[in-house]
Amino acid sequence: MAKAELGLKIGFYAYPIVLFVTLLGVQSAQFYISRHGSTTRKVALDNDLKQHIDKIRRFYARCIWVLQVVLSGLLIASIVYATREVFADQDGVKGSVVFSFSAYLASFVGVLLYYVAGLLPDPEGPWNPNSAHLSAWCVGALAEIVIAAALSAVEPKLRVSPGFVDTLNILGAARVLVLAFMIGALGLREYKTKALEPKSLPEERRGLLENGNGAADGYGSVQPTAAEPRRTQVSGTGWLDYFAGFRVLFPYLWPKGSPVYQAIVLICIILLICQRTVNVLGPLQLGTLVDSLGEGKLPYKEIILYVVYRALQGNQGVLGAARSLLWLPVSQSLFRRLSSAAFEHVLGLSLEFHLNKKVGEVTSALSRGASINTFLESFCFQVFPMVFDIFVAGDTVLFNATIMYNLLYARPDATEADVYEACKAANIHERILNFPDGYETKVGERGLKLSGGERQRIAIARAILKDARILLLDEATASLDSHTERQIQDALERVTEGRTTITIAHRLSTITTSDQIIVLHKGKIVERGTHNELLAQGGRYHAMWEKQTTIEKKEKEKKELEGEASETGSQ
């Protein structure tokens, strides 16, 4: 059964990949043939015939576009139906083969994006499908048939609702039919246009006087020279042809032919990696420094390391300044090469070009290419670091506005009564009323005027006000004392009733009433079950529970002893 499940996964994932590979492969073959194949000279068409052929092409292109819209709708229907099956009740379903919904959805979303891309407007002109698209459609129809046959073969053993596979096969058959219409429309278009176009003539490369009698060699005649190099004619191959034309700029984006500048680029990239590493080590060293301060001695080593990291950090630090300084000769070299090539190209143009253009227009056109010079620098030192530095902060974020504004951010149409109820559930209502301006109190930038517990309770009230069907609580009570934590736990139990709640917590008292508790250790699930089941197992959860409850008992006893001591002292 594992082989059947694996086979379905491979078939699902291969579907969009084969589509893209087919399109790219055929376009690459077309491009290669256009560059290295035999050239022909097309006979000029009169205007009426050309307009008639263009009209035929536009008509069939619109028909294919409409068929692609229908095909996209059928793909969306399959995706929606499979998604509905994921959330359907599977209690009474029998079967030994698990249907891989994730692979199916990922596959058909990829196929949907492939066909939707053909519906987007083409900036270079009307969309004109060719033999590359035809090959991809044929492969797509074949893939639909293979997937339908595989699903039908394992249908009795699949763990899905009755009729699920039949519905998918019906939608697949409809897609095959639409693809057949698209293939037929493109074939009919080519048949009609080829019949109207005159046949191409071989490209003339030899002199007119060179015939069966030999070349003219009389007085004043000129001996024929070798044939000129064959001109390359590129047929429309879409983005691949554009990319090939853009390759002339590649030598000006990279210091080609200069090992010294190439080594400098490599050193700058190494410095960039060191900068990103220091950005991570700086906060970690700060935490180590703070921990060392609690040992009762001055941590010279930690302080020196933190100062060094701060000196190296940022674009204005030592590493950033060194990288900028090293990059200057590379940038100047690339600019000189690009400018020289551009002016050399312009000066090599015909006299007709220079007579019809103004000096200002030519100079302006040359200056517009200066941004190409900064492409390598922008990509290496701005785009890549920005992607690397994207992280999600785990802090409670509040806007520099009133408490009421921050709460209404969750649901702008909520009434004041709804806000008050949410705050009461989060045990923050009375605290807000004690502020001088109540709910109109400004919280400051990122809520700095509030304590950590107050910020967290306002965030909980905002989550309650959102009234979402799925609630995710990540260390929801981490900044609260034990008394407030118990009050919020009671409120959360009322709020989460009837909702799916995912709680991430180190305080185990927060999750004692959960339906299922999953214990993670080193990225792996080591235990799972309810609170009582995990305590009975005596594993990691039991050890953590005993440790936390013991600490809480000691704190409680300590507070009681301090209270008794204060009462005795007052007497």
Image: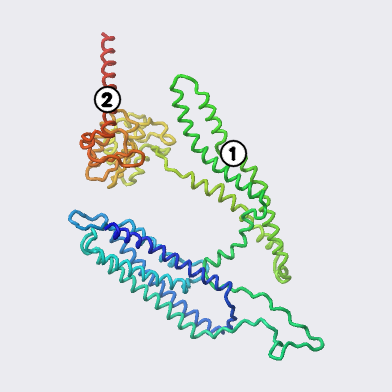
Report the disc number at residue 550: 2
Residue in the image at 29% along x and 60% along y:
4
The residue closer to the viewer here, 289 or 542, is 542
On screen, residue 518 versus residue 400, left or right, reads left
Gap in Å between the C-alphas at discs 1 and 2?
49 Å
Report crowding for label 1: few under 14, some 14 to 19, many 20 or more residues within 10 A (C-alpha).
many
Where residue 224 appears, as percent x and y from the top left, is: 74, 82
On screen, residue 563 versus residue 228, left or right, reads left
Determine whether the residue tagged by mark 2 lies in a helix, strand or loop.
helix
Q: Which residue is mark 1?
A: 319
Above-or-below relation of 566 to 425: above
Determine whether the residue tagged by mark 1 lies in a helix, strand or loop.
helix
Q: Amino acid at mark 2?
A: Thr
Examine the image and state in which quarter residue 518 appears.
top left
Residue in the image at 47% along x and 33% along y:
284
Where residue 93 appears, as percent x and y from the top left, is: 19, 57
On screen, residue 213 versus residue 528, left or right, reads right
Q: Amino acid at mark 1?
A: Leu
Report the disc number at residue 352: none
Where residue 519 appears, as percent x and y from the top left, is: 29, 39
